[in-house]
Amino acid sequence: MPSLGRASAIIGAGTLVSRMTGLVRSILLVAVIGSYESRPADAFAIASALPTNVYELLAAGVITGIIVPQIVKSAAHSDGGSKFVSKLLTLGTVVLVAATAIAMLIAPALIWIYASSYPPAQHALSVSFAYWLLPQLLFYGLYALLGEALNARGVFGPYSWAPTVNNLVSIAGFVVFLVVFGGPYTQIGDWTPGMIALLGGTSTLGIALQTIVLLFFWKRTKLDIRPDFGWRGIGLRHIGTLAWWTFLAVVVGQLAYIVQTQVVTQASGKASIAVMGYAWLIFMLPHSIVAMSISTAYFTRLAEEIAEGRMDAVGPNLDESIRSIALFGFGFTAAIAAASVPVSRIFSDSTDGAVATAWVVCAYLVALVPFGVLMVIRRAFFAFQDTRTPFWFGLAQAIATAIGALLAWAAVALGLLPLGFLAAGVALTQSLATLVQLPLAVRLLRRHSDTAALRPSWRALGRFALAAVPAFAAGWATFLLMGGAGGWAASDRLLGAVGAAIVGGVSILVYVAALALLRAPELAIAQRTVRRMLGR
């Protein structure tokens, strides 16, 4: 297995490339369907969220949190785990095929659950998109199963690089759309069956090819896989017990998300679901590049340490992971917050849309670092094969998120919050709910590990937060010198990208300088990680 640093660099580099191509994909999607004040964009956003939401409900927590430790343990079997993984993949495929078929049968009901306020024409368009997009559920599940099996065997690269294939396919398809039909089409009545088929079919084809790519790297696992329907003896009862709590956690999370979407769709035609989706994309860019790449490699090692009984290594593992994530996370928070308007202009078809999206981006950024740290803590519970405890602190977060969304809607109804800021209010309450969840999760982790080993983590977070203050101030001052929201950096998409690079670059430089003045030892970690990523 590659070293943690090298593995994280491979994952980070792959994620960076996939996210960059994903940005291009999203820019083209805006050119096709619009974003701010576009009801078709909202209809597509709800439909495209269905496969991931159903996948999360059925399998995401099980695959990412439970399967990896089980595959790691199966490596000790006489066949290296081939039989176990064969049974696992066969079972997963059967479940996913059945779930995809059922989801497509009830597509109209699913759209109504998430967006009951849509008028008939918008509901019908969203359902039409859903029929083309829901097959992604099958491929998302297979991609996660194959990818996590590769990760568990120390083959990290393909899982992080494969999404680039999806993005390239989508980019090609969207370019064809623009050549054939033009765009953007921001009115419901503009959409024809051929346009719907091209947009939805291209999106699903990309996910399918992303999954197929993983098969070309399967030989590296040294596992001999074949269909095996003899599912007895693979510990289904044990996996089922673990999965039950994970399933419940996802259910309460989805219920909170349904409350959010029902609230935010009240603003459809303004800053609504599509705007939140693009803001979330911007938020997830640094999280995916940093937190996902670092935590994935650390999680595999953590599962191995616990399986081998090396409990003394758990605390230092978590400490190193948290500090690595937070080091980059605070820098990205300062840079993206300062450049929130120009970076949002890349995904908006107007300056007003960029400003509206920027408010949502900043609301999400409040929880960027806690979100990454919480992912590490949650995976630590999974490595200990404890899925019950994450359910309880996840429940607390879900309740707080749902209540926050309702309070935001109440503020709009009472005239305390403009309708155009509803999405930002919902995003902010979600971030605050994450801030409530994190200390609760850390406290509950004491049941398994001595959290005293995390004290250096919290001191490091203080250093990073202190360095982020002048970094944001320098970036924001640069943005204002460039004319602010009325300047050239928010005038069109290309200039928005240039402006975001300048503002973000200034923030990052000041952040690094501040850390150097504070003599932060973690700078050496950052240098090694960046060098490895550039080297890959």
Image (cartoon, helix red, strand yellow):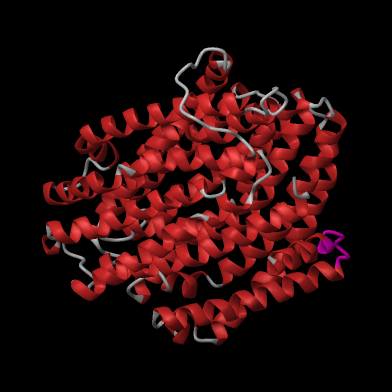
Q: Quadrant of residue 31?
A: bottom left
Residue at figure coordinates x 36%, y 62% from the top left: 170
Residue at figure coordinates x 61%, y 80% from the top left: 477
Residue 198 drawn at (x, y percent): 23, 60
Q: How many marks?
A: 0
Q: Is residue 482 in sight in this rendering?
A: yes
Residue 396 drawn at (x, y percent): 54, 30
Horizontally, residue 378 falls left or right of residue 193, namely right
Q: Quadrant of residue 485?
A: bottom left
Instruction: Decide which of 104, 417 is in the foreground and name it.
Output: 104
Q: Quadrant of residue 36?
A: bottom left
Horizontally, residue 268 falls left or right of residue 70, namely left
Residue 475 drawn at (x, y percent): 62, 76
Image quarter where the N terminus lies is top right
Residue 391 drawn at (x, y percent): 56, 26
Image quarter where the C terminus lies is bottom right
Q: Is residue 406 in sight in this rendering?
A: no
Task: Please determine whether, in this image, residue 513 is positioned above or below residue 361.
Answer: below
- The verdict on residue 338 being magenta is no
Report the magenta residues as a range: 518-524
